[in-house]
């Protein structure tokens, strides 16, 4: 548990340091728009609750998947295919950017 808390702290520090970076701001904005569009789509078309729709959107874009939720309409399945193709790259870029910032800060701390 302590390791999780320390890692979360490092991640949040990296996140807040990156807020000033224009590329990160664009990635964060795109990620928010993609997650919002997925949440709206799944809650309206597939009938998921807003929380379930957001959960499914995040699980899909992080490639974790969800064993309990899945689109049942053909339109929902087609949307999900396009959603994955466009969203996974953006989400991955955001995660990589935060990870690199965490690694760079750790290297700088180790050099001191």
Image (spheres, rainbow, N blue to C red):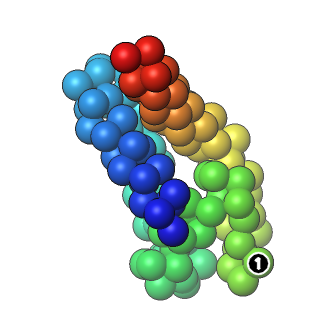
Mark 1 Cα-neighbour bin, 10 Å: few <14, some 14–19, many ≥20: few
Image side of residue 107 versus residue 76, left or right:
left
Q: Is residue 19 visible?
A: yes
Frontmost residue, 26 versus 39:
26
Q: x%, y% of residue 30?
A: 41, 38
Q: x%, y% of residue 91?
A: 55, 41
Image side of residue 111 versus residue 81, left or right:
left
Based on the displayed image, in which of its 4 quarters is residue 112 positioned? top left
- Identify the residue shown where x is 31% and y is 40%: 13
Q: x%, y% of residue 43?
A: 49, 76
- Identify the residue shown where x is 45% and y is 78%: 51
User: In the image, is residue 94 above or below residue 7?
Assistant: above
- Identify the residue shown where x is 41% and y is 44%: 11
Q: x%, y% of residue 39?
A: 47, 66
Frontmost residue, 59 versus 53:
59
Q: Which residue is mark 1?
A: 67
């Amino acid at each position: 548990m302590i390791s999780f808390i320390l890692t979360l702290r490092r991640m949040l520090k990296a996140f807040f340091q990156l807020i000033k970076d224009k590329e990160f701001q664009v990635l964060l904005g795109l990620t928010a728009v993609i997650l919002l569009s997925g949440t709206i789509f799944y809650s309206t078309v597939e009938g998921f609750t807003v929380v379930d729709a957001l959960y499914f959107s995040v699980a899909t874009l992080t490639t974790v998947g969800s064993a309990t939720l899945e689109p049942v309409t053909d339109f929902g399945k087609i949307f999900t295919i396009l959603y994955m193709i466009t969203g996974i790259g953006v989400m991955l870029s955001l995660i990589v950017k935060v990870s690199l910032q965490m690694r760079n800060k750790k290297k700088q701390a180790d050099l001191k």
